[in-house]
Every structure is written in C-alpha cells, then in structure tokens.
Image (cartoon, grey):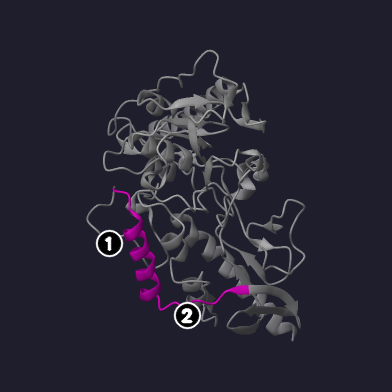
Amino acid sequence: MSRCLAERSIDHVVLERGEVANTWKTERWDTLTLLTPNWQSRLPGYGYEGDDPDGYRAMPETIAFIERYAHVISAPVQTHTKVTSVRLSNGGYQVVTDQGEWQCRTVVLATGACNIPNVPAVAEAVPPAINTLTPTEYRNPDQLEEGGVLVVGAAATGIQFADEIHRSGRPVTLSAGEHIRAPRVYRGRDIEWWMDAAGILGERYDEVDDINRARSVPSLQLTGSPERRMTDLNSLTDIGVKLIGRLAGINDGKAQFSGSLRNLCAMSDLKMNRMLNTIDEWATENGLDDEVDPPHRYEPTAVDASPPLSMDLGNGQIRTIIWATGFLPDYSYLDVPVLDRKGRVRHDGGVVDAPGLYLMGIQFLRRRKSALIDGAGDDARDLSAHLAAYLDQRAVAG
C-alpha cells in the first residue's frame, strides 16, 4: 500500500509497533516456510530475485525479503511506534501512538488477520499438569516435554506441527475439524501454479455466493519442503500420527471428541477433487494436456471405522496440547464504530464502513489470494485508487 500511495504522490507514514517484518521475527516457529513458491512473492515494483523460484522461503529469507522491499521502495516506516487508538476527529482521524499523535484524512488498517491465537473456551478446562501452547509460542519440539502431544486443528499449521513433532520422537494425536486437503504438486506443477493460472486465486469477493463463508474457510493443508511432498492426514497416519475428531469439550479431565471425523474427511476429499476438476477443465480448454502429466486422483482419506470419542487427559500420556485453531485480528486500538457483533470490521472489499478508512491483509478481502503476499499488490492498487478518489472529492468539496 505504501508503494501504491507513493506512486500517486500521496503523503503518508507507515506506523509499525516493532521492526519491519516484526511478526515474522517474533511470532513464528523455527522451521516455518512459506506455503507459496518463491516466484509467487510478487509485490508492486518488486519480486523474487533468487535462483530457486520453485522453492519455499524459510523465515530468515522471508524477513530479508520484506526488509529489502521496504528499503527498495523507501517506505516511510516509523518503527517501534505502537498505535493505541484510531478515532474520528475533525472530519478525519486522530491516530494516538506511544510516540505521539497524528492527524490524517485517511487511515489504512494493515495489522492483518493473525494477531491473536483463537484459543477455544474449552482450553480453560485443561488439567493444570498439561502444558499448553499457541502457534505464536511454539518454536520447535525441543521446548516440549517428553511424552504425548495433542495438536488441536488440522489446517496448514496443525499438520505442520503434527508432522514435525511426531518425527521428533513424541507421539502425536491430531484432533481434526473442518479442513481442506490439497496436493503440493499436481500433474507435475505446484498446486499454487494451477490455482494462479486457472484464475482460482484471482476470484473476486463480489463473484462468490457467500463471502462470509469464503472468508472463514481454513487454510489448505500445505507445507513447503525441498521435496515438495504432500502433507495430509494420510501422510501423517503413515508415520504413526493418531487421528481423532474435533475437540468438543473437557469434563473432569476427560476430553470428548466429535464423531464427525469420517464425514469431515469425506467432505475435504470432495472439495479437493472439485478443485482438481476445475484445474483439469482449464488445462484442457487451454491446450495444456500434452505439456503436463495426465490427470489423477488421490486415495480417500483413511479413517478408523470407530475413532475414539474420549481421552483421559489425567493418565499422563498427553503432556502438551498445542492449539492450532486459527487466529483472530486485533482491533483493540480501533475506536471507530465499524465492528460487527463478531468483532469483524464492516467493509466492502476493504472499503470500511467509515469515510476514509480502509482495510488490508485479511482473508478474501478483494480476491481469494488477498491473504497471500501475492495478493497484497492487487488489493493495494484497487484500494489506493479508491483512497485517491476520496481525497480528490474532499479537496473539491472544500
């Protein structure tokens, strides 16, 4: 957004609570890699410059990439400046920080969607002898006690934790709710290449039937490894991870799990195959069938006929629980009446329900790829154009 505003000669400042790429530096685990290939990190006026376009950047490389971008575009970043309040003031906004106050006509909320781990209320009933961690606290298996680990959540984060921790020698049980299975490579090309080329990632928010539902779907079960291997529930059970249903409650030290695991896995398989059908149709329509591998389908997710519905958390077998149950945005600084009853900002494709206020970096903001690095540029171009028009209208009015 800063780059797009600069191209329009709009004076602005970027306020950052820590340092550039702060969240990547302080709230991510050691082995995390991007789920998108390097070539897909396309930003306005900048892109991947290395010799491994099909690889997946680790954290140090990701941090360096963002820092380099800020330097290349000369972004006016004011670091170590925590915003404590954004409020309406004199037809614009007053932004209060721990380093002083700002008065401005417009504000872009670019604090993202992954600020606060979404730990379920059932966590309060976990026996005190069991350690609990969120994804922002987990760094590597060495920080965990020896013994069993219960990972709650089977989207991208949960399956990465389950895979890494089980390979460290600690037995893992994975509690799986709704999830979306996806191959890392399909017909010889990265699944992200197919989704990009076929227009799936570029689908707009005003082209889907239920945008609220689309914004709440879990992340694809993907990992970024040098082997480009597929990590799904089948690959996890192959190495010994135990599958169990969605965590429904904890009473007297006993965890109860939903009996819907088989149905959820069947639905996940169905969604994956629908996506592969879309890709196959696009490949045929665009004459690619002879250039890529032939279509194929994956074995259905294997689930025990009767997965356990309960687990005694007091018998010492589970020593750690990790809540891979998603994140929530943090709008505690926002003193403008634009939040709905669920605490989400009311907006139309990033144009917030308050004049001159904009939103960036949340799931399916304007396009299906909005939450990816690759989606930020298109959203910023659209919203900076709207912002510029708003400022022009203000200038004409008075």
Q: What crowding class fits label 1: few (fewer than 14 Cα within 10 Å), some (14-19), or many (20 or more)?
A: few
- On residue 154, the disc is none
Instruction: Kindly indicate the quadrant of the structure image that contains residue 242.
Output: top left
Judging by the rendered image, the residue that carries numbered circle 2 is 76
Taking the magenta stretch, the answer to whether it contains residue 67 is yes
Residue extending farthest to the left is 51
Give the residues in magenta: 55-83
Across and down, in percent, residue 178 comes to 57, 33
Question: What residue sits 77% from the left and 65% below the top?
Answer: 337
Q: Are marks 2 and 1 in contact (CB under 8 Å)?
A: no
Q: What crowding class fits label 2: few (fewer than 14 Cα within 10 Å), some (14-19), or many (20 or more)?
A: some
Q: Amino acid at mark 2?
A: Pro
Across and down, in percent, residue 90 comes to 76, 83
Tell me if I can see residue 323 in this picture. no
Left or right, 266 with respect to 230, comes to right
Mark nearest the camera among 2 and 1 is 2
Give the mark nearer the N terminus: 2 vs 1.
Answer: 1
Taking the magenta stretch, the answer to whether it contains residue 247 is no
Residue extending farthest to the bottom is 398
Left or right, 17 with respect to 347, comes to left
Q: Amino acid at mark 1?
A: Glu
Quarter of the image that includes the C terminus: bottom right
Q: Nearer the viewer, residue 78 or 202?
A: 78
Q: Nearer the viewer, residue 113 or 349?
A: 113
Judging by the rendered image, the residue that carries numbered circle 1 is 49
Tell me if I can see residue 118 in this picture. yes
Q: Nearer the viewer, residue 209 or 236?
A: 236
Question: What residue sits 49% from the left and 16% below the top?
Answer: 304
Is 265 located above or below residue 129 in the figure?
above
Instruction: Kindly indicate the quadrant of the structure image that contains residue 85.
Output: bottom right
Kind of element beneath mark 1: loop
> Could you tell me how far apart the alpha carbons at marks 2 and 1 are, in whole angstroms?
23 Å
